[in-house]
């Protein structure tokens, strides 16, 4: 599949904003076959991953955030497929490659994965082979993508381990994963992911299984690596605190769609979608003490087979308007550059109800 | 508690959803099993084979020992439809008769199927009397020659002129049931020892596991030969049958014990088992009410997969002459007739029982695989 | 079962010097001399009637082991757990045999962390929740289902769900079933072992509110174990902070968060991500070097000293005792001298201490 030359395909907004985003996802739809039928895991999402910045995708279970992340590398489960949309990745030569058009098992996508786009996920023990040493896992990857000799690749592996903060890296190259603690293993996974200097790192809940203090260190590490290498990060999480720590831009997902998108300050200070507001209100804040009561979102996330008619969120929404929200889907309403909201009340924050904080 | 409301789906909930919600483990397992087409089909084949074994006397045209010296090593007669016989009558089903021919080079008398003679074959033919299910005296057979004096060897005849098809059908009874009985004994031993091993752990577990290791490391064929040789030669065939079953199951229980032990070990640390104990349940209750139901499906799968190895083992033993012997009819005993090269080249249809063994073992394996894959519907 | 001096009426459970050592696991890869795992070492705290006591710490701190010891799943190596019975007398739980322990299984209940594995997938909800009632013969068999339906309604589930199997429920609903099971016997003390950690954010809020309401309605006492400090602050009255098997600090929730006395507590508070980017940029985080210590290989002296920026010679050699300091407890040699930073309270808008 020949990569599509950039100028023919560049949408207006990309030309206007500079520099161009690293990844431009447009109306992506992913379907996954399950025992109970075909699930629209991702149902038309549009977003950009800017260069050298971090985009956080926030959502709860069933929101489709993990599937979105993996779709960027066309790494879907066997029963999943990209049904529609495009994922334009700007490679090192300036060409835009549509990941959705590449054969999921072909050579082109395999040269992208690991070298240009890397992934770390929640459980480091599952990502590392228990029967190989760290060196035996790092070195072949480096050799394959960068074509270095064994010695050079080993030197690079040691350098990488040092950069992620593993003490005595040359010795530890011969250790097995179980000889590392949880936080260390995640660092090893980061080293593995970044060993070939990719331009995009997809981090799928990498700190969820870690202790608080370790989590803080990993977040610091990722930010440092971003500063030094200009790495773009797509960080997937459900933890709003982590989002506030690490994100530059945020996309909030619910039932396979992005309900709100904006910079981290915009989302936290001025959330326009009732789901975002409700999420922010339902998280206990350090310092607020026992006095206030958490405002829980009523009801539960519906099954993807029983999508509500009209707006996805309306049965649980405090500001739902009868006759409007239960009839038609609001669609994406743009209220600023790269700021959109899927709600009819997007331009009327006052109508959304009381203060978010406290 | 205003913000705690019942879940979203209104109670106009689809009946199917509620059935699913209230479906116990066996319903879910069966549903998953049905999706495995090969296993589902195999279920029917296996049930069919057992049905045949149960009603062998009826289904087989002849009894296993009826012979006809005139037709030794007679080749198989194909079942054909719509033929007219010498008397001018048309019959629905028929077979061609035999014509004797003399081979001057080999100086041998052989039988060749005579295309011209037509011998009718009918349903519910009258034949040798028997007792259906051991109780009901009858003499009709599912299929048989219209004229009892005429031969009908659909799968050929053996060296005594006995019908291979009938003998194979009767052999199914012994071969398939030996699997069941053997597995029952293995199941008992496996559950008991595997359960003790897995539940108590510690040194008990060590001892049992080392015993299993020891047993598994003994070469099976010499062990069986040794044990079979110990069985008195002039014992009643039925007792011999029981002995062989016990011998086979002595080895088979080890795999089952391992499965049971593994399940117990993994269940011991599950929160719901702990919760049961903290509810005040006695150890017995925890085991039987909370742990065992979690792995009965796995046991069923293991048992189903153990039966084929019993069948193969019996076949092997009898084939070697140290298992069941004549006049008992099992597939292994039948295959013993096919042992000589001479027999094979002149009468290859003697291997038909081997085909039956392959079919039975394959379908049982598919069935067992299907059950095992469906066994954990919550995974 | 020896009669012990009665506890004061406001104390429900008093733990003193609780210690649990696990024998080292023999393995081929154990190159060092195998030390026992000091999962819990000399832990002391008290739970007051009607309060919610938080037990917080990271992995390896021993909080789960403490709950297992309280419930009788493990036997302590040393120490006492004195529990005040319904009749006012006290009993040392650690002296009870396994069978004698069962007598208290209706009074001390637990809600587990994982909604997937804490409910038997082969049983219907009415059997899961009703099991404790049946086994202890608290309710005649014919009335168990009605009682279960009652409990389900109390936790916000439809009564007709009693006939359903766990696979039909979401994580949050299953956790509610677990709560119903814990409350079935009208216990006095409920241990919540990371009960909301495995739930989605929005469901967490619902469940926490439910727990608060139930506590008020039934006069329950909670031991709330968690690693999430913001949840702890929301629901707990007092907090016990643990590190590698030992207690490092005990204080009321307000005092702990406003002004921690132990450097580890300070680091924990500082490490917690705050869902407010503006505020986050103002705080400078304290970076703790190294990883959480291994309970099988605890550093000598104060277990925290390798990571502590105030560590002195005394810290490297002498383990600090847990001592009283102005109504709070702390295990640090330098507690009086340190001025540690707490959490900025959102209402006041400025940092304390």
Image (cartoon, grey):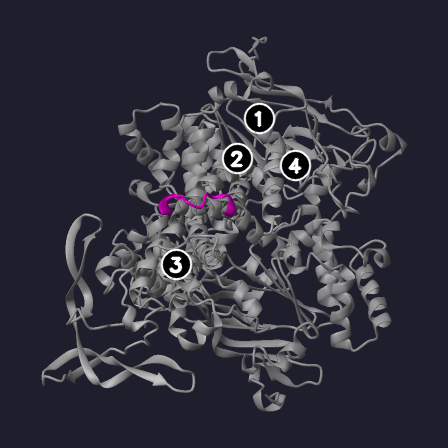
Circle 4 is placed at which residue position? Answer: C257
Q: Considering only vertical position in the picture, is C301 above or below A192?
A: above
Q: Secondary structure at mark 4?
A: helix
In primary-sequence order, the first of circles 1 and 4 is 1
In this picture, residue B285 sits left or right of residue C73: left
Chain ID at mark 2:
B
Q: Which residue is mark 1?
A: C70
Comparing labels 3 and 1, the label whose residue is closer to the camera: 1
**Distance between the Cα atoms at labels 1 and 2?**
28 Å
- Please state the horizontal and vertical placement of residue B296, each as a whole percent of the image: 42, 45
Which callout, 1 or 4, points to the residue nearer the camera? 1
Residue lying furthest right: C313
Kindly report the distance in space between the C-alpha atoms of the residues bearing marks 3 and 2: 43 Å
Quick check: do tags 4 and 2 share a chain? no
Front: mark 1 or 2:
2
* Label 2 environment density (alpha carbons within 10 Å; few <14, some 14–19, many ≥20): some
Q: CA distance from mark 4 to mark 3?
A: 39 Å
Q: Are marks 3 and 1 on the same chain?
A: no
Q: Position of residue B7 (x, y in %)?
A: 36, 49
- At x 81% / y 59%, what residue is drawn? A173
User: Residue at the spot x=58%, y=53% of the render?
Assistant: A239
Q: Which residue is mark 2?
A: B196
Rounded to the nearest angstrom, the CA distance separating label 1 from label 4 is 27 Å
Q: Position of residue B139 (x, y in %)?
A: 15, 58
**Which dot marks residue A303?**
3
For the point 18% across and 70% down, which residue is it? B149
Q: Was residue C313 drawn as part of the magenta stretch in this picture? A: no
Other-residue count near label 4 (Cα within 10 Å), few / some / many at <14 / 14–19 / ≥20: many
Q: Residues within 10 Å of mark 1 (few under 14, many from 20)?
A: many
Q: Position of residue C149 (x, y in %)?
A: 31, 36
User: Which label sits in the foreground, 3 or 2?
Assistant: 2
């Amino acid at each position: 599949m020949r990569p599509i030359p950039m100028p023919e395909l560049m949408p207006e907004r990309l030309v206007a904003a500079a520099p161009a985003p690293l990844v431009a996802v447009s109306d992506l739809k992913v379907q996954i076959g399950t025992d109970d039928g075909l699930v629209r895991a991702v149902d038309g999402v549009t977003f950009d991953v800017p260069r050298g910045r971090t985009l956080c995708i926030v959502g709860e279970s069933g929101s489709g955030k993990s599937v979105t992340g993996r779709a960027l590398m066309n790494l879907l489960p066997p029963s999943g497929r990209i049904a529609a949309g495009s994922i334009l990745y700007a490679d090192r030569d300036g060409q835009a490659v549509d990941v959705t058009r590449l054969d999921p098992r072909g050579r082109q996508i395999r040269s992208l994965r690991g070298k240009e786009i890397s992934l770390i996920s929640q459980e480091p023990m599952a990502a590392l082979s228990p029967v190989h040493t760290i060196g035996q896992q790092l070195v072949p990857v480096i050799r394959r993508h960068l074509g270095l000799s064994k010695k050079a690749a080993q030197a690079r592996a040691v350098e990488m381990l040092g950069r992620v903060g593993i003490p005595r890296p040359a010795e530890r190259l011969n250790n097995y994963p179980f000889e590392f603690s949880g936080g260390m293993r995640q660092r090893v996974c980061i080293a593995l992911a970044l060993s070939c200097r990719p331009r995009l790192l997809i981090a799928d809940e990498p700190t969820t299984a870690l202790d608080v203090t370790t989590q803080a260190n990993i977040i610091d590490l990722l930010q440092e690596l971003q500063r030094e290498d200009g790495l773009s990060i797509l960080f997937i999480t459900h933890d709003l605190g982590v989002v506030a720590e690490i994100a530059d831009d945020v996309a909030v997902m619910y039932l396979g769609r992005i309900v709100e998108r904006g910079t981290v300050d915009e989302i936290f200070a001025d959330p326009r979608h009732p789901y975002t507001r409700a999420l922010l209100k339902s998280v206990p804040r350090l310092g607020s003490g026992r006095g206030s009561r958490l405002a829980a979102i009523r009801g539960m996330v519906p099954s993807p087979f029983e999508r509500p008619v009209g707006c996805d969120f309306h049965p649980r929404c405090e500001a739902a308007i009868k006759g409007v929200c239960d009839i038609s889907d609001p669609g994406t309403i743009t209220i600023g550059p790269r700021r959109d909201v899927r709600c009819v009340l997007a331009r009327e924050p006052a109508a959304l109800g009381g203060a978010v904080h406290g | 508690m205003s913000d705690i409301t019942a879940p979203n789906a209104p109670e106009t909930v689809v009946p199917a959803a509620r059935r699913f919600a209230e479906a116990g483990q066996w319903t879910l397992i069966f549903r998953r099993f049905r999706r495995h087409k090969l296993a589902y089909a195999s279920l029917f084949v296996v049930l069919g084979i057992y049905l045949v074994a149960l009603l062998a006397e009826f289904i087989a045209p002849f009894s296993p020992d009826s012979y006809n010296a005139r037709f030794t090593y007679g080749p198989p007669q194909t079942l054909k439809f719509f033929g007219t016989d010498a008397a001018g009558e048309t019959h629905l089903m028929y077979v061609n008769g035999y014509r004797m021919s003399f081979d001057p080079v080999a100086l041998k008398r052989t039988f060749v199927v005579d295309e011209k003679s037509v011998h009718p074959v009918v349903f519910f033919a009258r034949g040798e009397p028997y007792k259906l299910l051991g109780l009901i005296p009858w003499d009709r057979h599912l299929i048989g020659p219209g004229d009892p004096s005429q031969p009908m060897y659909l799968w050929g005849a053996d060296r005594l002129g006995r019908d291979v098809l009938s003998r194979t059908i009767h052999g199914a009874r012994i071969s398939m049931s030996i699997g069941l009985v053997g597995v029952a004994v293995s199941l008992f031993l496996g559950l008991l020892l595997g359960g003790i091993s897995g539940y108590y752990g510690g040194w008990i577990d060590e001892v049992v596991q080392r015993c299993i290791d020891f047993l598994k490391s003994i070469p099976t064929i010499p062990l069986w030969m040794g044990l079979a040789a110990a069985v008195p030669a002039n014992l009643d065939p039925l007792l011999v049958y029981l002995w062989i079953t016990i011998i086979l199951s002595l080895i088979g229980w080890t795999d089952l014990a391992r499965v049971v032990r593994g399940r117990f070990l993994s269940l011991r640390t599950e929160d719901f088992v702990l919760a049961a104990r903290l509810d005040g349940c006695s150890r017995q209750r925890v085991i039987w009410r909370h742990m065992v139901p979690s792995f009965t499906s796995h046991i069923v799968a293991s048992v189903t997969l153990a039966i084929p190895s019993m069948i193969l083992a019996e076949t092997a033993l009898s084939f070697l002459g140290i298992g069941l012997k004549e006049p008992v009819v099992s597939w292994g005993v039948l295959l013993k007739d096919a042992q000589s090269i001479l027999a094979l080249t002149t009468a290859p249809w003697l291997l038909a029982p081997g085909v039956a063994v392959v079919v039975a073992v394959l379908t049982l394996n598919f069935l067992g695989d299907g059950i095992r894959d469906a066994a954990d519907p919550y995974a | 079962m020896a009669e012990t001096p009665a506890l004061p009426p406001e104390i429900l459970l008093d733990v003193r010097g609780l210690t649990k050592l696990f024998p080292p696991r023999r393995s081929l890869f154990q190159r060092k001399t195998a030390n026992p795992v000091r999962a819990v070492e000399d832990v002391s705290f008290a739970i007051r009637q009607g309060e919610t006591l938080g037990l917080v710490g990271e992995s390896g701190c021993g909080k789960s082991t403490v709950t297992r010891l309280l419930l009788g799943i493990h036997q302590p190596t040393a120490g006492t757990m004195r529990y005040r019975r319904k009749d006012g007398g006290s009993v040392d739980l650690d002296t009870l045999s396994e069978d004698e322990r069962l007598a208290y299984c209706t009074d001390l209940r637990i809600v587990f962390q994982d909604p997937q594995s804490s409910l038997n997938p082969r049983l219907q909800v009415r059997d899961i929740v009703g099991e404790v009632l049946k086994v202890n013969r608290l309710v005649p068999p014919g009335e168990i289902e009605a009682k279960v339906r009652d409990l389900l309604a109390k936790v916000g589930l439809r009564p007709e769900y009693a006939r359903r199997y766990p696979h039909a429920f979401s994580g949050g609903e299953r956790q509610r079933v677990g709560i119903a099971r814990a409350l079935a016997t009208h216990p006095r003390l409920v241990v919540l072992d990371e009960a909301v950690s495995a739930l989605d954010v929005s469901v967490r809020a619902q469940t926490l509110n439910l727990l608060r309401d139930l506590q008020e309605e039934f006069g329950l006492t909670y031991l709330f174990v968690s690693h999430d400090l913001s949840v702890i602050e929301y629901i707990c009255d007092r907090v016990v902070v643990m590190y590698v098997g030992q207690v490092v600090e005990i204080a009321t929730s307000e005092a702990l968060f406003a002004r921690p006395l132990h450097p580890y507590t300070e680091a924990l508070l500082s490490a917690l991500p705050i869902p407010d980017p503006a505020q986050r940029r103002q705080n400078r985080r304290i970076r703790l070097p190294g990883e959480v210590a291994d309970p099988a290989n605890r550093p000598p002296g104060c277990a925290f000293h390798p990571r502590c920026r105030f560590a002195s010679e005394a810290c490297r050699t002498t383990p600090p005792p847990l001592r009283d300091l102005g109504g709070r407890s702390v295990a640090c040699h330098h507690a009086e001298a340190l001025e540690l930073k707490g959490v900025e309270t959102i209402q006041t808008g400025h940092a304390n201490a």
